[in-house]
Each structure stands twice: as structure tokens, then as C-alpha cells.
Image (spheres, helix red, strand yellow):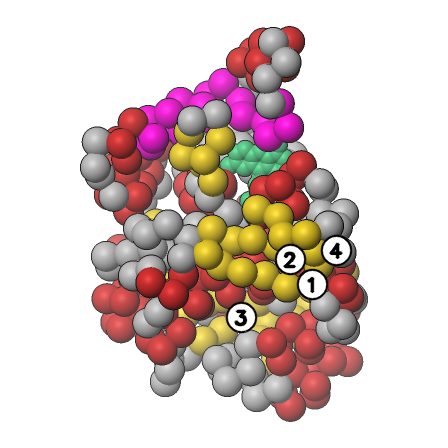
Amino acid sequence: VVALAGGVGGAKLADGLAQVLPPERLTVVVNTGDDFEHLGLHISPDLDTVCYTLAGLANRATGWGRADESWHFMQALEALGGPAWFHLGDRDLALHHERTRRLAQGETLSSVTRQLSARLGVWPTVLPMSDDRVRTYVQTDAGELPFQAYFVARACEPVVQGFRFDGVETALPAPGVLEALGSASAVILCPSNPWVSLDPILEVPGIRQALAGKVVVGVSPIIRGQALKGPAAKMARELGIEPSTAAIADHFRGLLSGWVIDTQDAAEAERVQNAGAVAHTTGIVMKTSADRRRLAEDVL
Ligand code: FO1
């Protein structure tokens, strides 16, 4: 099984899948369009969110970063007048530092991710979508903004007009991605943001094509017109798209075999079928670890 995942929602379902499947049967392909260079470090937020979650180390309140974190570095940096808008905890910093050091020695992101995730105690295979540099830009009424400037520094306030995945046209899928997709009996689109988490992965040349003829099952990131987390519903409205689960299924038209929606959206099942996917209705909110497991079982 291959799961395509972005940040927090994707990590939670990946964790559910990891509870159900033996590690050698699960590969998680993660968005790296959110990656950026900050304070001289290579930050890969979605890779880290997935790895910390699978390792049982994630901060359950935020979904990103580590549990049991301290913030001495950030506080000292802020006192010096340094850039403190992006919060890097003391323990989290060690991961960014070590990744940056290894990348500077010429290692690839997928190789660094393999080694560091093993050290963290992650057993399924976690792959970046690409080892090549892809950077998401958000086109807004305040101009084109690098993803984290939009998402964190401006708290998703600017009105979204479109997206650009800089570098994606020439990016190659990371080693192992096409192989995993080729041998997959099912591909899962995790409940991640369709525009800024899943689309960058699907835009890496070869990845969308590798899904042709596969069983592809997506889990809705929207319930009753609202995103479970993050700006997906706001983005939809600003793009002139109805923030409904059926509209998101339509976004993935041609790709989906199945679309898993919440029981509260049962009335939209017919519209989902019209978008070409079999609708499956269940509870899709993942509050507890048991919820993740149950949803993963349902999706499988
Ligand atoms: N998100 C925030 O809203 N504010 C932060 O200060 C922040 C810091 C951060 C540090 C490390 C990391 O791995 C993720 C972090 N995130 C933060 C989350 C990140 O911006 C988003 O989760 C993703 O890029 C969107 O999926």
C-alpha cells in the first residue's frame, strides 16, 4: 500500500495504516513543496510531521513538532531580535541540523530521511516525493508568497488565487517512489490539503501517470464544508470552488476509485459517484490513536 501524504491529517492516517499493515507493506510518499531554508537549516515540515507521528513522538496538540519539547533556542533568538516567526523547538532543531549537515555532504533527501527515520524508530518506508528541490508558492492578493510565508508568517490570511510548484517540471520522483507505486495493490490519498499537499506530489512527472489503472482511494479532508485542520475550506472558497467533499472528489476526477466521506456528508454520496468514485461513508475524524486505526481498516 502506498499512501500519499502532506502534513498533520496525512500523518494521522499514515499512523493508522502503520497500525494495521506490516511495515514492509506500507510506503508513505510525502510532500516536500513545503520545505524551505530557514536559519541556514533545511526544514522539511511534512516529512518530519509524518516521521514524528509514526515514531509516536509528535506533539499531539499542534500535530507538528515534537512532544515534550522545550523552546530555549527560540526564546534566546527572539531576545536577540532574530526571526522567531517559525517555531523550532530545541529537540526538533537537532533533526533539522543533522539533515542539513548530511545534505551539505552530498547525501540525498531520501537517503537522509531513511537513516534519520530509522533512528527515530519509524518502520514503514517514508519517502520524499522527490530528492529534487520543489517549492510551493501561493499566489495571493498580497502577491506571490513562499508557502511558509503564507501559511505561518501570514497565518493564511491573504486571499488565494493559485499555486506554483517551482521546480516540479524537472523534478524526478525519489528513488523507490515509482517502484512502490508500480507494485502497490492500492494507493491512498490521505486527508491532506488537495492543493498544497497532494497536488505537488501528483505534479512530480511520472507520479500521476503511475496511478493509472490502480485502485486509488482518497479520504476527504472536508466535513460539512469545513476542513478538519488548516486552510483547505478557505482556499476552496477563494478559488471559487464550493468547500464540499464532493467538490474535492471532483478535483481528483479521473484518479479516484473510491472516496471516503464522513457520515455527516452522507447526502453527498451521489455527487461523489457522479465525480466517478465509489463513495464510502464512515466516521473520518481521527481524535484518538484507535480512530486512526479504525479509519485505516475502513479505507483498506
Ligand atoms: N506551523 C505553524 O503554524 N507555526 C509554526 O511555527 C510551525 C513550525 C514548524 C516547525 C517544524 C515543523 O516540522 C512544522 C512546523 N509548522 C508550523 C507546521 C508547518 O508549517 C505545516 O504543518 C506544514 O508545512 C503544512 O502541512
Would you name the residue on which mark 1 appears? 161
Question: What mark, if any, has residue 139 been given in the picture?
Answer: 2
* In-image side of 174 versus 248 (left or right): left
Would you name the residue on which mark 3 appears? 218
**Which residue shows up at 47% across the image and 40% down it?**
36
Contact flag, marks 2 and 1 (Cβ < 8 Å): yes
- Three-letter amino acid code at disc 3? Gly
Q: Does 50 appear above or below 80?
A: below
Magenta range: 84-100
Q: Residues within 10 Å of mark 2 (few under 14, many from 20)?
A: some
Question: Alpha-carbon distance for marks 1 and 4?
Answer: 7 Å
Would you name the residue on which mark 4 appears? 141
* In-image side of 264 versus 127 (left or right): right
Residue 33 lies in the magenta-colored region = no
Residue 92 lies in the magenta-colored region = yes
Question: Alpha-carbon distance for marks 2 and 1?
Answer: 5 Å
The nearer-to-camera label among 2 and 3 is 2
